[in-house]
Amino acid sequence: MNKVILMGRLTRDAEIRYSQGESSSVIARFTLAVDRRFHRNNEDQTADFISCVAFSKTAEFLERFGRKGTKFVLEGHIQTGSYTNKDGQRVYTTDVVAENVEFAESKNAAGGNADFGGAPSAPSPSGAAGDGFMNIPDGIDEELPFMVYMGYPTLPEMEIIQPEMLKTYSDGNKVYCSPSDLYAELDNLLDNDYETVWTTTSKYASPRTYDMSMELLEVTEIKGIMISQVLYHPMADKRSPYFMPSQITIQVSTDGGRWENVTYFETNELGRGSGERTLLQFPDGPRPVRYVKFTLQDGTDQGGNCMITLGDIVFYK
């Protein structure tokens, strides 16, 4: 088994570059200063400086937030390699490939730890949240998803917001969608039954974006949102996974005028299996909601056909 878990501070801003080729991707290189738990009294060095590399979405996260002194916890694996330098000598390398990176403390707890004269000083306990959610540094929470990915294990006890608690629009549906698809069963999204689905009725040559809105009859304390994928046979139906929404953005409001972005997800961040459910939960507990907007983008299959099929989008409290 090759598995590494580290917690430490960036010694400098993450170094970002882009790979060459038709499908370029982001690569982030950085050094993490990790405090040593034990050291001799006469040792000046109290931390190890570990070379790390990240790719794709993890690298994009570090491109935005990988600043000198920021404390992260990362999970990854060790990768060794070698190259020949300009003098013809063989040089061997060891890096930690970061597969997952999260903030390890709030910005306030970081205090004056952004400057590295040598090893970083160990911070005092940051009052980490006891609910299991990572602390988000102050000033950037508007850029991060507000809702927390909760996975799709056995569902906890929850009270589902029933369709009758939603306004009925003039077309007879409780979900308004633009562009409209007259033959799509929009209300199937609300019945908490992933065997009944919402699917666009035509395939398109390029992805379309759908703006969907729902209105509760009154302001209601909402704990979170559950998104369910369609139920399909993985061996017999190999196309359904491609037609799951490629992007989902959710906004909420209490008055229909002031909107707050609460989450943005791409398909690969949601459960993609047959009937899999993803719970998105407000980390600070229930919050008042009356109006909800969803923006969804078509999925695309290997033949370039674009459409959406989705089981449920339901609220719970």
Image (cartoon, helix red, strand yellow):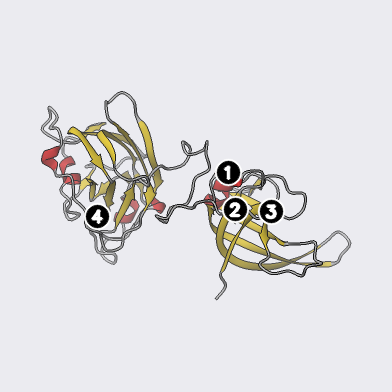
Q: What residue does disc 4 label?
A: 230
Q: Is residue 289 above or below residue 240?
A: above
Name the amino acid type tagged 4.
Val
Image height check: is 66 above or below 7? above
Say what secondary structure mark 4 lies in.
Answer: loop
Horizontal relation, residue 239 to residue 70: left or right? left
Label 1: how many residues lie within 10 Å, few (<14), some (14-19) or many (20+)? some
Q: Is residue 123 above or below residue 146?
A: below
* Label 3 crowd bin: few (<14), some (14–19), many (20+), radius 10 Å: some
In three-dimensional space, the C-alpha distance between marks 4 and 1, rounded to whole angstroms, equals 35 Å
Q: Quadrant of the N terminus?
A: bottom right
Q: Which residue carries the number 1 mark?
A: 65
Based on the displayed image, in which of its 4 quarters is residue 156 positioned?
bottom left
Q: Which mark is residue 124?
A: 2
Between circles 3 and 4, the one closer to the viewer is 3
Dots 3, 2 in contact, CB < 8 A: no
Q: CA distance from mark 3 to mark 4?
A: 50 Å
- Residue farthest to the bottom? 1
Label 1 sits on a secondary structure element that is helix
Quarter of the view holding residue 164: top left
Name which of mark 2 and mark 1 comes first in the sequence: 1
Q: Mark 3 belongs to which amino acid?
A: Ser
Position of residue 121 in the picture relative to residue 201 (left or right):
right
Which residue lies at the image location 42% right of the left edge and 56% below the top edge? 132
**Residue 257, percent from left and from top:** 31, 23
Q: Which residue is mark 3?
A: 121
Q: Please tell me whether mark 3 or mark 2 is closer to you in this view.
A: 2
Type of residue at label 1? Answer: Phe
